[in-house]
Amino acid sequence: MTGGAGADPVGRALLRAMRETGASAGGLYLLADDEPVLRLTVMSGLPAPFLEPWSRVALAAPVPVAVATRAQRLVWAGGRQQLAQDFPRIAVAVPYDFSLAAAPVGEGAGTRGALLLLWPAGHPPRLSADERRAVEASSGRLAGLLGDGPRPAGSVPPSDGPRVLPAPPARTVGPDEAQAAADYLERLPGGCCALDLDGRITLVTTGAAELLGEPETRLIGSRPWEILPWLRDPAFEDRYRAAVISRRPMPFTACRPPDRWLTFRLFPDGRGLSVWISPSDKDYGPVEPYPVPTEVVPARAGQIYHVLHLAAALTEAVGVQDIVDLVADQIVPAFGAQGMIMYAAEAGRLRTIGHRGYPAEAVATFEGVALGAANSPAVHALATGEPSFFTSPAEMERDYPGLPQLTGKAARAVLPLIVSGRPVGCCILSYTQPRTFSQEERQVLTSLAGLIAQALDRARLFDTKQQLAHDLQAALLPHGLPPVPGFAVAARYLPSTRGMDIGGDFYDLIRLGEDSIAAVIGDVQGHNAAAAAFMGQARTAVRAYATAGASPAEVLARTNRLLSDLDPDLFTSCLYVHIDLRTRRACLAGAGHPPPLLRHPDRHTTVLHVPPGLLLGVEPEARYTATEITLPPKSVLALYTDGLVETPGVDPERSVNDLARRLNDAPPVGPERLADALLEYRQDEADRQDDVALMLLAALPVGPMTPT
């Protein structure tokens, strides 16, 4: 949809932002009222199809306007390199040289969206101070216009896409000057034509028409790659897109069959492109005949980049739930759908793995039904391997009576998910209103279905592997801790975030008799099944030597020899603590493990010095030394693995001291609540790279006491 700024204050504010910042293109994204989505409302400097993959952006997406809105900060990407580092999806889908800035419009609860500005190739890698002030002032003006009241004219997203504001004309000329310009163009060698920003020919000289082999009347108003079959290769449309976005001249050479090679030079600005066409000075020989109208022609460049953008998003997904969330939160908004349901084909039956916008009874109707028995579009798609598109309830009712009423949907795209000829599932995008699907959109959705299928198949394998690994680890960790007279004990295990296989952290509490216990904590190198198995061997060895009556130093030495003899090319840290329950004396020995902490009865916390020892499994003849401390009533001994304290770029000693400070400042609660408090800041991390084990032993006061 196009239209001038006119009396529209939002449109005028956007054009002013472009003018004052020197940006070549801009757009305003506004938050939808009923969903966490940013919608492109108004834009200028680019054709609407260029931003079609981002006309609706999920607020959670790693896209500049979404990041700017969520984080309430200005986002800047100065050129292709930074764009590839910070926003790889954008760099894949728009592989041209340009810079961009996104700034939030409004603050806090009053945030209305984001302002997007683009600069052509050659912009310095950083915004200047004047440009930054201009961007911030522009977003502030837009925020003031939008305010908290009714939206002003021009700020409501049209149903048929964003409004595109044309750039002001360079200048207006009279008939005589216009005729002189036409005569000038006709005298130039070769031929010339003009394209608007949408790529449509607005002027063509006689020489250009002769070189292109089509009459002027057929060329005017058409896009070259649509009207000329020999320019349908997406590489030629790609050169046009590159020129419009980078604002740099772009040349290319094409063959007009059978053997006439032509050179095209594109000169862009904010209103369109001037194209000079000349015979090429090189003869590349004949080419294959171009497709006749009944044949399938190559995909458009825009289609290719749209699929690449969504494919890049799919590569970030790891598990099945990641795939479902990505389709629901980013692919559904990108295609304007109101509902989504995904099925997996398992053992000849449909299993729902995710849905949005569907009533529970509609989901339950086809859950678990046999593929050979159910009459549904998903079953048909899996049986035939062909996608189907229903544009109205009448079409759906004709083939599947009762389904429109059951689901409340008026149109849908039913996409089978096929990998190497094997059906793995089905994805349905649905709409609450009748809707047509263009041929280009059908091609994009069909291509996307293949990418979703591969991602889903990979994710299911990952989830299976993850479940097996975590089941193994759960079996190796103690299911509960034995009661200890005079002590209250708590233990926690926190796995790493998604993307890691399995942790090697372990802990144990061993009753050695009526008057003594042993507490053990360790961390095996690696994050896989081999590390888990090695962890099980280490824990079993420590328990065996401890129950045999070995001293702490001997327990570590013997375990070290055993693990070295097994030669698994792995090693583990370990801290072993023997506690005499009568005297509350603790004997500690360590093997490359972080130092324990002791919170004293007066609640000040110290880092205990335990003689360092080699990691277990490195040197068979390593020796270990023990040290003794007293655990007075109301003291707390904290044993932990490095996942609780390690932070990239932070000195380990400082991290340990920070943990001691948190233990020192924690309220006087029992070990269960204290353990939760110490883990709280790690649990909130979105990208925790290591698992965490923690054990707290709280010495109770003399006499009865119930820990809180």
Image: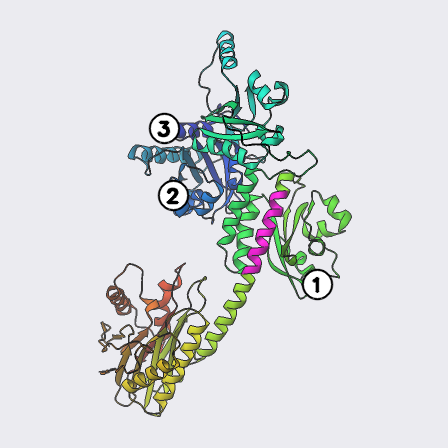
| Residue ID for mark 3 | 20
Q: Is residue 455 magenta?
A: yes
Of labels 3 and 1, earlier in sequence is: 3
Q: Earlier in the sequence, mark 1 or mark 2?
A: 2
Q: Quadrant of residue 686?
A: bottom left
* Quadrant placement of the N terminus: top right
Q: Nearer the viewer, mark 2 or mark 3?
A: 2
Q: Is residue 405 left or right of residue 121?
A: right
Prevailing SS of the magenta stretch: helix
Q: Residue at x 69, y 64 (%)?
A: 348
Q: Is residue 621 visible?
A: yes
Give the x, y percent position of residue 694.
Answer: 35, 73
In this figure, what is the number of numbered marks?
Answer: 3
x%, y% of residue 24?
42, 30
> Residue 433: image x %, image y %?
66, 42
- Res. 705 visible in picture: no
Q: CA distance from mark 2 to mark 3?
A: 26 Å
Residue underneath mark 1: 369
* Three-letter amino acid code of the residue under disc 3: Glu
Q: Nearer the viewer, residue 299 or 424?
A: 299
- The foreground one among 173 and 577 is 173
- Residue annotated with mark 2: 81
For the residue labelled by badge 2, is the local secondary structure a helix, a strand or a loop? helix
Relative placement, left or right, of 554 versus 377 is left
